[in-house]
Image: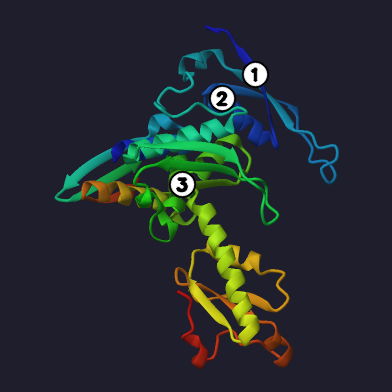
C-alpha cells in the first residue's frame, strides 16, 4: 500500500525527496498519510481532488485483495 | 563536472516550459541555476514560423553538491522520457500494477484517431484475473488512466491522449456500444418513440453521441445527473412537429429502458 502511494506520488511531484508516506493499521483499516513539499500539494491532489481520488480508487482495489479498508489522507 | 560550471540548453513552447524541462533533466532547483534566455520563441502566425523558446541553464558551482543524480530518490521510477514516451508510459503503468499486486504485461501502441482527436497512445494490460482492474463502470480503469495521463503529460510537457485498457476491454465495449446505438436508433426511427439507454460514464455516452451524430432520423441527448446520466435517443420527427422538444420523455414513456 505504502509503496504504491510512494511510487505514484514521486512520479507526480517536482521534488521526490520530500515525499513521505506513513502507514497505520487500525483493525481492518489501513490509514495512509502522504506528505509532499508544499509546492507539490496541488500535483498530488489534482483539480477538484481528482488525482487523490484516483489514488483512493486504486487503494480500494489493493485493499479488497487483502481484505482491508484503506484511507488516504494528504498533508 | 566537479566544481566546474555546467551549461545546458533547453527548448520548450514557452520560456517557463524550457526552464522547467531543464531543471528536471538536470535534477536541480531553480535557485541553483542561472538562466539565460536565448530565444523567447514565437507562436508564429497560424503555426507558420513558430519557434520554440530556448534557454541556457548554468548550474552554479556552489550548488554542484545539491545536484541530484537522475533517478535518485525515485527508485523504480523510469527516468524522464526523451523520445520514448511509449516505453516510459508502459513502465510507469507496469510499476503501478506491480505495487497493486497484479502480475500483468503492458503493451504500448498508437491507436487509430477517432472523433477528430489525435492518435491515442494505448497501454493495453494483459494478464490473469484482471476483472478487478476494470471495476464497476470501468471506474478502476479510469483511475489508472487518469493517473498515467497526469504523470506522463507532466513529464513530456505536451498533451498526449493516453488510453489505458485491460485486455482490449474498452475496444470491445466501444464496438458493442456502437452496435447498440445503431440498433436502438433503428427502433426509434421505426416506432417514433424515444429510447433511454442505461446509465453510462461520460466516455461511453460520448461513443453513443458520436455514433449517431449524422443519423438522418434520430438525435441524442443526455439526461439526468452523474453518475446516473443516461443517453436518450429521440426521433428527429418530433422536432418538426413541436416548437420545442421536451427535455424529458413524458411519463408514459419514461419507464422505457434498455438493459
Q: Which residue is mark 1?
A: B8
Marks 2,1: beta carbons within 8 A: yes
Q: CA distance from mark 2 to mark 1?
A: 10 Å
Q: Can the viewer see residue B217 in this picture?
A: yes
Q: Is residue B25 above or below residue B173?
A: above
Q: Is residue B206 above or below residue B37?
A: below
Q: Are marks 1 and 3 on the same chain?
A: yes
Residue A23: x percent and y percent?
A: 24, 41
In front here: B171 or A45? B171
Q: Are marks 3 and 2 on the same chain?
A: yes
Q: Which residue is mark 2?
A: B25
Q: Secondary structure at mark 3?
A: loop
Q: Which residue is mark 3?
A: B167
Identify the residue shown where x is 38% and y is 39%.
B97
First in sequence: mark 2 vs mark 1: 1
Within-10-Å neighbours for mark 1: few <14, some 14–19, many 20+: few
Q: Can the viewer see residue B221 in this picture?
A: no
Q: Is residue B64 above or below residue B111?
A: above
Amino acid at each position: 500500500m505504502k509503496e504504491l502511494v510512494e511510487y505514484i506520488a514521486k512520479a507526480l511531484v517536482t521534488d521526490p525527496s520530500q515525499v513521505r508516506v506513513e502507514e497505520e493499521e487500525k483493525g481492518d483499516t489501513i490509514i495512509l498519510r502522504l506528505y509532499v513539499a508544499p509546492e507539490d500539494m496541488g500535483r498530488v491532489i489534482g483539480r477538484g481532488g481528482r488525482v487523490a481520488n484516483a489514488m483512493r480508487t486504486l487503494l480500494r482495489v489493493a485493499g479488497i485483495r487483502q481484505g482491508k479498508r484503506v484511507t488516504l489522507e494528504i498533508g | 563536472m566537479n566544481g566546474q560550471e555546467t551549461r545546458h540548453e533547453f527548448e520548450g513552447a514557452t520560456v517557463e516550459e524550457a526552464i522547467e524541462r531543464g531543471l528536471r533533466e538536470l535534477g536541480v532547483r531553480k535557485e541553483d541555476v542561472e538562466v539565460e534566455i536565448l530565444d523567447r520563441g514565437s507562436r508564429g502566425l497560424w503555426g507558420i514560423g513558430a519557434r520554440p523558446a530556448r534557454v541556457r541553464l548554468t548550474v552554479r558551482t556552489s550548488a554542484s553538491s545539491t545536484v541530484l543524480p537522475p533517478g535518485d530518490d525515485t527508485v523504480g521510477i523510469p527516468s524522464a522520457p526523451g523520445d520514448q514516451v511509449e516505453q516510459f508510459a508502459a513502465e510507469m503503468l507496469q510499476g503501478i500494477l506491480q505495487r497493486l499486486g497484479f502480475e500483468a504485461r503492458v503493451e504500448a501502441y498508437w491507436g487509430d484517431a477517432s472523433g477528430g482527436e489525435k492518435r491515442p497512445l494505448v497501454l493495453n494490460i494483459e494478464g490473469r484475473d484482471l476483472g478487478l482492474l476494470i471495476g464497476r463502470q470501468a471506474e478502476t480503469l479510469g483511475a489508472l488512466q487518469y493517473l498515467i495521463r497526469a504523470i506522463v503529460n507532466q513529464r513530456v510537457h505536451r498533451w498526449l491522449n493516453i488510453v489505458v485498457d485491460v485486455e482490449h476491454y474498452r475496444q470491445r465495449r466501444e464496438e458493442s456500444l456502437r452496435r447498440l446505438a445503431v440498433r436502438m436508433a433503428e427502433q426509434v426511427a421505426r416506432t417514433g418513440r424515444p429510447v433511454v439507454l442505461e446509465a453510462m460514464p461520460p466516455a461511453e455516452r460520448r461513443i453513443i453521441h458520436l455514433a449517431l451524430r449524422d443519423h438522418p432520423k434520430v438525435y441524442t441527448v443526455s439526461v439526468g445527473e452523474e453518475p446516473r446520466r443516461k443517453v436518450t435517443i429521440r426521433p428527429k420527427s418530433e422536432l418538426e412537429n413541436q416548437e420545442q422538444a421536451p427535455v424529458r420523455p413524458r411519463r408514459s414513456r419514461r419507464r422505457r429502458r434498455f438493459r
